[in-house]
Image (tube, rainbow, N blue to C red):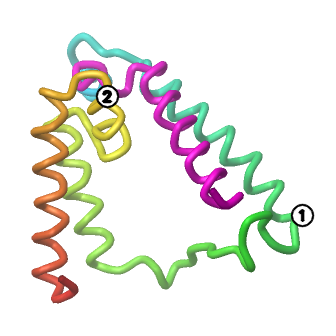
Amino acid sequence: MSRTTFVAASSGILFGAGLAIGGMTNPARVRGFLDIFGDWDPTLAFVMGGAVVVMAVAWAIQNRLGSPFFGDSFALPDTSDLTPSLVGGSALFGIGWGIAGLCPGPGFAALVIDPAKAATFVAAMLSGMGLAKLVAGKG
């Protein structure tokens, strides 16, 4: 296994473990966060806050590096990446996340924890991704 593959796999395992420990593989937890006028659950806010802190540190480190440790150059987004397709896809993502209580990362992590429930979500997600590729003419 190459060093890059090892780092990618380790990062994925760490991310999945964080999602599971933070309770983000439980759709009820996510729906509880979105229920601001009912029985609101702030857990997701703490998970997102933790992610913002980690990302702020990563941006600070990136600004001091000439190149990434496991690549030739950084691939950073800019405002030209903001397209109507991205905005529409983001809206669909948010709607689906609110309905299902899962998004791709927690959905795949939930396959390990509760495969019967997560499999339906993951199958629907993969079908939607395939359909989007066909509609965009990239499939």
Mark 2–mark 1 Cα distance, whole angstroms, equals: 38 Å
What is the secondary structure assignment of the residue under circle 1?
A: helix
Relative image position of residue 51 (x, y in whole percent): 58, 38
* Percent x, y of residue 78: 57, 77
Q: What segment carries the magenta color?
A: 1-29
Instruction: From the top left corner, tell me how far across and down residue 34 is, in percent.
Output: 27, 29
| Corner quadrant of residue 93 | bottom left
Q: Residue 117 vs residue 81: left or right? A: left
Question: Is residue 35 visible in the rendered structure shown here?
Answer: no
The residue under label 1 is: 64
Q: Residue at x 25, y 49 (%)?
A: 94
The crowd level at tag 2 (other Cα within 10 Å; few <14, some 14-19, many 20+) is some
Can you say whether 72 is above or below 117 in the image?
below
Numbered label attached to residue 78: none
Examine the rendering and report whether any part of residue 98 can be seen: yes
| Residue 109 drawn above or below residue 133 | above
Give the amino acid at mark 2: Val
Residue drawn at x 76%, y 46% as measured from the top left: 57
Q: Is residue 4 magenta?
A: yes
| Left or right of residue 32: residue 56 | right
Front-most of 52 and 123? 123
Task: Kindly report which numbered mark, 2 or 1, lies closer to the viewer in this rendering.
Answer: 2
| Residue 112's disc number | 2
* Magenta stretch, overall SS: helix
Residue depicted at x 74% and y 56%: 59
Residue 55 is situated, as x and y percent measured from the top left of the image, at 66, 47
- Residue most extreme to the front: 1
